[in-house]
Image: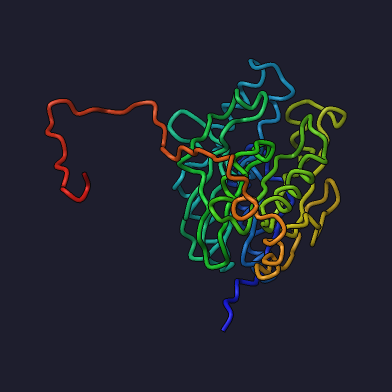
């Protein structure tokens, strides 16, 4: 018998969090996961930094004025693991679905823009920290490293993702394709200075170039954000683009919603339908020009490595030499 690949329903959430409120944003995320699960979704994607929102002040306010919001974000960010991730895991288990959600991750004294991956049993299977915050976001978030850049082999296929401006970097997307990615999460912030077409162009390109289904999920910027920061819609528009995209062609299969509409986009993911596209341009396989090769460092980079001087070196067995 021929091998058959998974077929399932995916959900792309387009919504606003409760700005700078971790507990309320977790509540809303769990409600959205419950809704998508009841509608049969086996993969549920929520936007970038859904808990508890994006650092829009970095784009609009002087650093000293924005510092108070950065401090509030720090106090409302998510440690991994924590009570917040446990609650998200419980929602994933109730839904019986894989869940990918954007969070502000707190680790020590730093914050990271992170995608958190949960399985249908509610377990954390991984996370991806954004490699390089975009523009003034560097004032808020630290840099990720290669240790969190992975493709996860799941029951529904090989799952990976990138965050917002990472889609403009050629090599992170290519490396996911070379790892065998079949389903791609494209997670986006509500726009600041970029054109709305950025999310659409980059997400559709990833689907076309790398033969992956793309689940594009984008944050809505609520009026509460504008009121808190003292900015108006001429400076910060809520222009979200969430959709499900076909591999190999970039065709939009489901969505998008209205630019500032909250809701969930549903679409069927049939990995078998991607196979014919492989014979046109499989960029990490038979369509790979072998004059070009990528080096990827997957080490975890730490600010401190402790060398226990005076302790005997670990024994190296012959098979390890």
Give the quadrant of the N terminus: bottom right
Q: Residue at x 53, y 52 (%)?
A: 179
Give the quadrant of the C terminus: top left
Above or below — where is 216 with respect to 22?
A: below
Q: Residue at x 49, y 35 (%)?
A: 145
Q: Nearer the viewer, residue 97 or 70?
A: 97
Above or below — where is 274 with respect to 210?
A: below
The spot of residue 72 in percent (x, y) is: 58, 30
Q: Say how the picture is coloured.
A: rainbow
The spot of residue 129 in percent (x, y) is: 53, 39
Q: How many marks?
A: 0
Is 263 situated left or right of 154 in this image?
Answer: right
One can see residue 228 in this view: yes
Residue most toward the front? 291
Above or below — where is 285 with respect to 164?
A: below
Q: Residue at x 15, y 35 (%)?
A: 313
The spot of residue 104 in percent (x, y) is: 57, 39
Q: Residue at x 66, y 57 (%)?
A: 212
User: In the picture, residue 201 is in which quadrant?
Assistant: top right
Is 18 situated left or right of 155 in this image?
Answer: right
Q: Nearer the viewer, residue 244 or 39?
A: 244
Residue most toward the bottom? 1
Above or below — where is 173 with respect to 152?
A: above
Q: Nearer the viewer, residue 139 or 253?
A: 253
């Amino acid at each position: 018998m021929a091998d058959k690949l998974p077929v399932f329903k995916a959900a792309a959430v387009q919504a606003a969090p409760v700005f700078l409120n971790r507990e309320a944003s977790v509540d809303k995320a769990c409600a959205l996961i419950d809704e998508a699960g009841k509608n049969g979704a086996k993969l549920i994607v929520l936007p970038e930094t859904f808990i508890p929102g994006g650092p829009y002040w970095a784009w609009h306010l002087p650093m000293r004025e924005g510092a108070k919001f950065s401090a509030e974000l720090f106090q409302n960010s998510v440690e991994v693991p924590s009570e917040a991730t446990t609650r998200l895991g419980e929602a994933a288990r109730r839904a019986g679905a894989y869940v990918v959600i954007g969070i502000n991750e707190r680790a020590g004294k730093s914050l990271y823009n992170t995608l958190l991956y949960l399985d249908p049993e509610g377990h954390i299977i991984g996370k991806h920290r954004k490699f390089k915050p975009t523009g003034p976001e560097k004032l808020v978030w630290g840099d990720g490293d290669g240790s969190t850049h992975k493709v996860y082999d799941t029951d529904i296929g090989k799952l990976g993702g990138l965050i917002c401006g990472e889609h403009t970097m050629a090599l992170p997307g290519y490396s996911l394709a070379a790892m065998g990615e079949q389903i791609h999460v494209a997670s986006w912030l509500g726009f600041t200075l970029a054109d709305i077409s950025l999310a659409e162009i980059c997400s559709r390109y990833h689907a076309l170039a790398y033969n992956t289904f793309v689940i594009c999920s984008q944050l809505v910027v609520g009026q509460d954000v504008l009121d808190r920061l003292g900015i108006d819609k001429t400076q910060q528009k809520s222009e979200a683009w969430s959709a499900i995209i076909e591999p190999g062609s970039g065709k939009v299969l489901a969505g998008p919603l209205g630019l500032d509409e909250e809701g969930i986009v549903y679409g069927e993911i049939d990995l078998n339908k991607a196979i014919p596209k492989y014979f046109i341009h499989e960029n990490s396989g038979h369509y790979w020009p072998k004059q070009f090769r990528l080096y990827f460092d997957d080490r975890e980079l730490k600010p401190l490595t402790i060398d226990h001087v005076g302790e005997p070196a670990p024994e190296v067995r012959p098979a390890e030499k």
